Amino acid sequence: MIASGLVAKKAYELGLEVKPWIKTSLAPGSGVVTKYLLRSGLLKYLSDLGFNLVGYGCTTCIGNSGDLDQIVADEITENDIIAVAVLSGNRNFEGRIHPLTQANYLASPPLVVVYALAGTVDINFEEEPIGTGKGNRPIFLRDIWPSSEEVSEIVHSNVLVDMFKSTYEVITKGNPMWNQLVVPTTDVYSWDPNSTYIREPPFFKGMSMDLPGPHSIKDAYCLLSFGDCVTTDHISPAGSIHKDSPAAKYLVGHSVKHRDFNSYGSRRGNYEVMMRGTFGNIRIVNKLLDGEPGPKTIHIPTREKLYVYDAAMRYKNDGQDTIVLAGSEYGTGSSRDWDAKGTMLLGVKAVIAKSFERIHRSNLVGMGVIPLCFKSGEDMDSIGLTGQEQYTIHLPSSVHEMQPGQDIVVTTSTRKSFTCTLRFDTEVELSYFDHGGILQYVMRKLINSAC
């Protein structure tokens, strides 16, 4: 961060400016950063270049840095431009930083400033100037890049122990707004039916102490059909809420204005929002749409093109099970709980893939969604599956007849039959499935221990 401030200082003094089509923001991980940048005088130069302080922590990498200039956004959309984001965070999945940025690169803080000055990532810093400074002088990276000695000098004189102490000692004291919150003293949480942020989830709705056991999956439709490497960012709701999405329609229906939509992350306590945002990534590629990216699918019985949520609800209302078909490494990326929660709430009963990311497979098991793997050397193409068929998964009627990793036969309405490996990998996971999921398993254990 010190280096980025020094780059900004040198660039400003040489007359460089950030290109007008570039969106900039500064969101440090800690308030300490602001203190030492302010003390060193470097915060001013970052602000002069447009890197204004917008907040702390998860901001840009979760899509919270705000909208693009409308003229820029229109240009990207109308001309099908592959727009680029460069950030010093730790997440660069496509569409996450902003729905319109398809290419996203991680870089050090000083390089983020440099790319903003250049206005492009298509540049050779060794041979091409970043821009033109005072007196029409071409300015190169070497002209503004600080030495290790320069950075160390600023660090030693401006990054002080007291800054950390004074910042972190007040964390547990809260702030006036937080401290004035009225907290109910009841033993059981009092759900606010009007809240659009926190709603009682339906995970225990209709639950009894009797175990539901394995559920049959007969004539299920394919909700989505994917290729390889579908990530948790494609599956789980993240970032901003698009104005035309099912989640947006829900919020508008509850009198929330567009400017107050906030993000999926901030509304993760409302299952109504999160289930509507599951598989809502605008860059997700569903084979049922012939490779067209976007959060929609084909409702097989009617051939209608619908948002994934709308199609899933139509299947549920009609009493029809659904499955997801996928390629290799399904669920790769950072672990999220809503990737499996949302899948289950959409009514998906099973996912059949070539392979799973380890944690996502476990999360699916925990939510009662059955993970199945094609046999080695087989996949949708080799078997001849199109995703248009209906699928029956022939499970044993009792969990006592099931074993981790056993073979399960799947048949289709087109008279195809293939064998999958059941990816319940332990006896404990079979117990979760017998209970309907890990949440119900834990709840029943708690109730039994209290009786």
Image: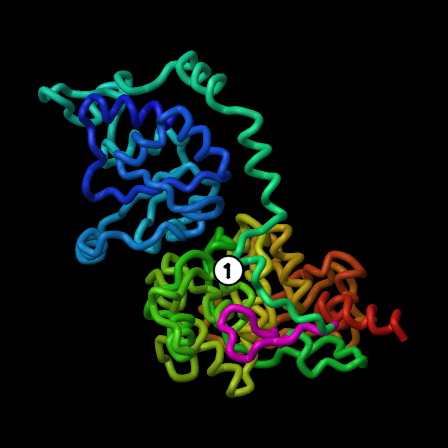
Q: Quadrant of residue 192?
A: bottom right
| Residue 429 placement (x, y as % from top left) | 75, 61
Residue under the point 24% across and 42% down? 22
Q: Which residues are magenta?
A: 187-202
The kind of secondary structure element at disc 1 is: loop
Taking depth in this image into account, of 397 and 96 the one nearest to the observer is 96
Q: Is residue 257 magenta?
A: no
User: From this viewpoint, is residue 253 visible?
Assistant: yes
Q: Circle 1: is it few (<14), some (14-19), or many (20+) Cα within 10 Å?
A: many
Vertical comparison of 46 with 381: above or below: above
Taking depth in this image into account, of 438 and 443 the one nearest to the observer is 443
Residue under the point 43% across and 56% down? 239
Left or right placement of residue 220 versus residue 6 in this view: right
| Residue 419 placement (x, y as % from top left) | 64, 65
Left or right placement of residue 207 versus residue 58 in this view: right
User: From this viewpoint, is residue 381 visible?
Assistant: no
Taking depth in this image into account, of 68 and 225 the one nearest to the observer is 68
| Residue 280 placement (x, y as % from top left) | 42, 64
User: What type is the residue that disc 1 sits on?
Assistant: Ser
| Residue 385 placement (x, y as % from top left) | 48, 67
Q: Label 1, on which residue?
A: 236
